[in-house]
Image: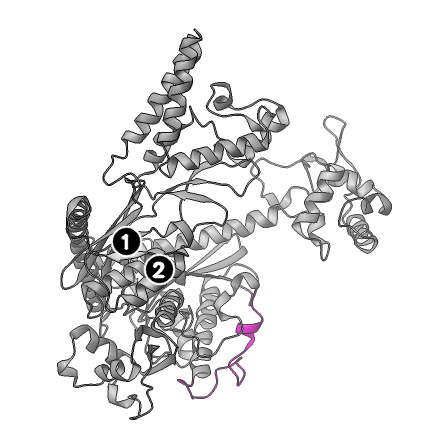
Amino acid sequence: MADPSSYRPKPGQIPDSPGVYRFRDEHRRVIYVGKAKSLRQRLANYFQDLAGLHPRTRSMVTTAASVEWTVVSTEVEALQLEYSWIKEYDPRFNVKYRDDKSYPYLAVTMNEEFPRVQVMRGHKKKGVRYFGPYAHAWAIRDTVDLLLRVFPVRTCSAGVFKNAARTGRPCLLGYIGKCAAPCVGRVSPEDHRELADEFCDFMTGRTGTYLRRLEKQMTEAAEEMEYERAARLRDDIGALKKAMEKNAVVLADATDADLIAVAEDELEAAVQIFHVRGGRVRGQRGWVTDKVEEITTGALVEHALQQLYGEETGDAVPKEVLVPALPDPVEPVQEWLTGRRGSGVSLRIPQRGDKRALMETVERNAQQALVLHKTKRASDLTTRSRALEEIADALDLDSAPLRIECYDISHLQGDDVVASMVVFEDGLARKSEYRRFQIKGFEGQDDVRSMHEVITRRFRRYLAEKERTGEWTDEEPDGETGDGTGPDLDDRDPEDRDPRDRGLKDEDGRPRRFAYPPQLVVVDGGKPQVAAARRALDELGIDDIAVCGLAKRLEEVWLPQDDDPVVLPRSSEGLYLLQRVRDEAHRFAITYQRSKRAKRFRAGPLDDVPGLGETRKQALIKHFGSVKKLRAATIDQIREVPGIGRKTAETIAVALARAAPPAPAVNTATGEIIEEGEPDTTAGSPGEPVPAGAPEERRGQEP
């Protein structure tokens, strides 16, 4: 635990101006980001007597090891920079709203020649119009199914669309009138885009125009005694009204607003948002957060606004945002929202009328979400805490292992040997920290040597990172250079490299997978694997990380210094957590190993051509139809393929000539000549069939 006075800035160093500040821990990780109208006054509050600080603030300042700041011109700039840094560094002591699910949106891909209506989740894409979010994907599909009667917009995937265009036959929706079938030319691109525009207009709340137009057309059809057409229009009107009934009118027709409500206690807060467009509730979403800092309701609302509108522009930011409490000060936040929208945004607390009544409904939803979350979380927290305590007691650790790393080796009869590293923090999987390795130190099957190599490589990088930041000043480990860039950092396979390690940027504070040590290393295996892992750590001079192994046969826990295993009760939460960690490492390793094996089996002669990418390989195969025809082509014929020059064509011809298949084999049992491209059934001598159970390595060998 650090003493805040050890890194407190000297008097007069801190400017009395707006800015954003960052607290960093001993590993240079950014653990807290804040903004202030006056940096001097705000930071002074953190360096008072610890007894006078809020418990969470006290925990933050004692975890931190340094503080730094950036001066800006205005409070709006401070708000924008704070949001950017929170997104970039993911500091552990900042309020971070987390969705309990990925909310689906109704999306219209206006960036395509033939716009498509579909369900989308995740990050929003440029050129796509979004409506929602919705609580359930089925709600979107029900709405779309009703609207397709009136607006038969394309809903099929790119593959289905291309297949229908190739065959000249539309899909089922095209036959039943729920798609205009642009794939077969029934409608022009311009007319189809107009349909998509009308669909979007209806979804934005402009419903009266279409209903009046359809009712007028129905009346005219009936007067002209076109009763079948009138009946179809009547059904279309019914479908539109049924779709509208799914979103009841709650405010005046022209109201576009977002209502944000907060329910909180001392430890957690829940936020609920209702999106009202055209007076109707078009979407709902909710977040829950741990209150890891001392924070007011207004500050919670400010963080929610940053989360909600930080990536939005234009009409995605409504004209009116109704909140339970205003940020202090409110002017910078309102100015920031106005800048995101491009026009004025009203940020206020509803006092009376329909808006106040709807806000009460949103508040009830927030209260229910908080109660439901606490009900789920209580059991989970208790169970995880008990599991970590049981592991600490069983392994005789000084404290509960808050960060656990588990390693597993995977291969197929000694081929494609790979390893996995999975990370659990506070008993939960942290998938962004997962890592995979290729075993490069030797060939063949040896799980013990593989485990030794993986542990060595992982913790060499940890030591190199400590040396780079000045935290480690002892003698350099073998194989590392004085600047911390040894062979394990520079010469590893691209697939085995952490993108955030590239360049080893100084003072960035971003989370890095190899920068922080675990409290416990778990290996999949028994005593030999555990001994190899412990030996690797000892060779690197690391003696403050515990090691254990979990053997699959009897689920025994092995420690490097003991001859007998530790047997945890079958009902132990600690054993269950170790099993989950081990099984996750096994899953991650075998998935990687299978992908590498599949990639190797798919390899062809064109893969050996230097500088020939996937796009040009596909163009060659599409042009000639097969590798056999490509091999028979001349250099001039190869050059006819777009993107292939003479030098590349010559390289392709040479590579294919070197990889030419042997002379045709003959099956002596039938006298049949085995053509190229047919499965080769020879092994050892022509005509000798390969047994059905023979390894794949024997198939296709030259006789």
Determine if residue 400 is in view: yes
Q: Which residue is at 31% across, 83% downward?
A: 65
Mark 2 secondary-structure assignment: helix
Residue type at mark 1 is Val
Q: Are marks 2 and 1 in contact (CB under 8 Å)?
A: yes
Classify residue 556 by image quadrant.
bottom left
Instruction: Tell me which segment is drawn in magenta.
Output: 470-493
Q: Which mark is residue 321?
A: 1
Mark 1 secondary-structure assignment: strand
Determine if residue 579 is in view: no
Q: What percent of the width, then of the height, locates residue 237?
A: 36, 22
Q: What percent of the width, then of the height, locates residue 140?
A: 35, 35
> Which quadrant of the rendered structure holds the N terminus?
bottom left
- Horizontal side of 432 relative to 559 (left or right) equals right
Q: Which residue is at 67% across, 48% downward?
A: 615
Q: Earlier in the sequence, mark 2 or mark 1?
A: 1
> Dominant secondary structure of the magenta stretch?
loop
Q: How is the image coloured?
A: one colour
Q: Which residue is at 78% across, 45% downward?
A: 660
Q: CA distance from mark 2 to mark 1?
A: 10 Å
Q: Nearer the viewer, residue 354 or 306?
A: 354
Q: Nearer the viewer, residue 518 or 163?
A: 163
Q: What percent of the width, then of the height, locates residue 34?
A: 30, 73
- Horizontal side of 272 relative to 691 (left or right) equals left
Q: Which mark is residue 337?
A: 2
